[in-house]
Image: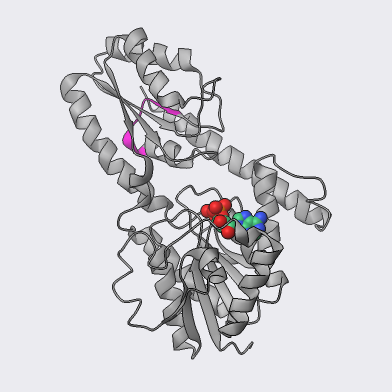
Amino acid sequence: MAKFRKIGILTSGGDAPGMNAAIRAVARKALDEGVEVVGIVGGYSGLIQDNIVPLSPRSVSNIISRGGTMLYSNRCHEFKTEEGMQRAIEVCRKHEIDAIVAMGGDGTFRGATDLTNRGIPTVGIPCTIDNDITATDYTIGFDSAMNTALKMIDCLRDTCESHARCNVVELMGRDCGQIALYTAMASGAVAAVIPEIPFDEGKALARIQRLVKSGKRSFLVIVSEGVLTEDGQKYGELLTKRISEQTGVESKFARFAHVVRGGQPTLRDRYTATAMGVRAVELLLQGKSNVVMCELDGKIVDVDINYALIADRTYKNKLKPGDLDSFTKEQIASMQALAEQRKQELASLYKMVVETSK
Ligand code: ADP
């Protein structure tokens, strides 16, 4: 067993409900193992600026049910420079931080692997409402964000039905339509528009017209914020106008934006945060690092961070020259299989939304 005296925790990138539950789990498990714990306040910039606070079992009390992150989050450009990185290492040495648990998305994990390479063992915990980390089936915050959206969409459904209207709802998701797609399925939307799958607007408008004739009064359409028009405008508002003009169904637009990033985490997120947090500490104590906690087929497992980052680029068709050089043929094949699996999962969900919008 690696004998760590002190573990640091940081949250970075976009916040997600469940981050606090993960902080609590890491802190309590480490303290239970006799390891000191410090919070790094404000992500990687907190590290560079030496903003470090001790954490005790009591200082993480009453946070399991709260959204946001008690350690705050930040985007830190300086951390991406060698100077910033060296400063971060100096602060770790000064505070005798032996290892770090970094919570966030792929940017956060890139930072984590840089720290590991410079002698500070790091484990990542995936926290992002977008569920856009290819290596894991699930990221902390996804369920909470969708349930927050769903509650509000159910409200819109009521009023749409009373007034025979359509409501187009724009949800977060720049490159990833999972929040929009799952929420569309669960809210009984007539269509979902996501960045990954081309949208047939003509077909969708014709479907609405057909459904009006069959007596349907209310319609919901869910659009990801990342879907843009040819001239770079967000598509949701344009679609709202076109539905009104071309189907005769009065249509309203709602942008939920950051609302879905806040609020109480669901049981699913609190559970995953706790299970991943506890496991992250166990792994560090076993001498393992440079891994990200993942959920695969319902099990919490650890995956090499570099593999996770490149699997992501494989899925997003964003591989850069040399990215695959350090991987074996088997690893490359498994990344490609994973990317294909993710595409199929999305396509079958999309099909389900269309098939049930009758
Ligand atoms: P997320 O973790 O949600 O993907 P970001 O992409 O904004 O969010 O990344 C969070 C932080 O991680 C950044 O502000 C930066 O400090 C750090 N980071 C991102 N990319 C890198 C990188 N290539 N190398 C080192 N650190 C990075």
Instruction: Indicate how the structure is coloured in the image.
Output: one colour
Q: Is residue 30 left or right of residue 335?
A: left
Q: Is residue 7 left or right of residue 57?
A: right
Identified at 47% across, 80% down, the residue is: 38
Which quadrant holds residue 352?
top left
Question: How many numbered marks, from 0 up?
Answer: 0
Identified at 52% across, 77% down, the residue is: 8
Whether residue 303 is visible to the viewer of this picture, yes or no, is no
Quadrant containing the C terminus in the rendered view:
top left
> Which residue is at the front of the view, 31 or 139?
31
Identified at 55% across, 70% down, the residue is: 47
> Which residue is at the front of the view, 153 or 345?
153
Residue 136, image x, y percentages:
57, 55
- 345 w.r.t. 194: above or below: below
> Which residue is at the front of the view, 97 or 301?
97
Residue 293, image x, y percentages:
56, 65
Residue 18, image x, y percentages:
39, 61
Which quadrant holds residue 209?
top left
Q: Is residue 70 left or right of residue 123?
A: left
- 276 w.r.t. 138: above or below: below
Q: In the image, which residues are magenta?
A: 186-192
Residue 217, image x, y percentages:
23, 19
- 355 w.r.t. 314: above or below: above
In this view, the residue farthest toward the left is 162
Q: Is 188 inside the magenta-drawn segment?
A: yes
Quadrant containing the N terminus in the rendered view:
bottom right
Q: Is 178 inside the magenta-drawn segment?
A: no
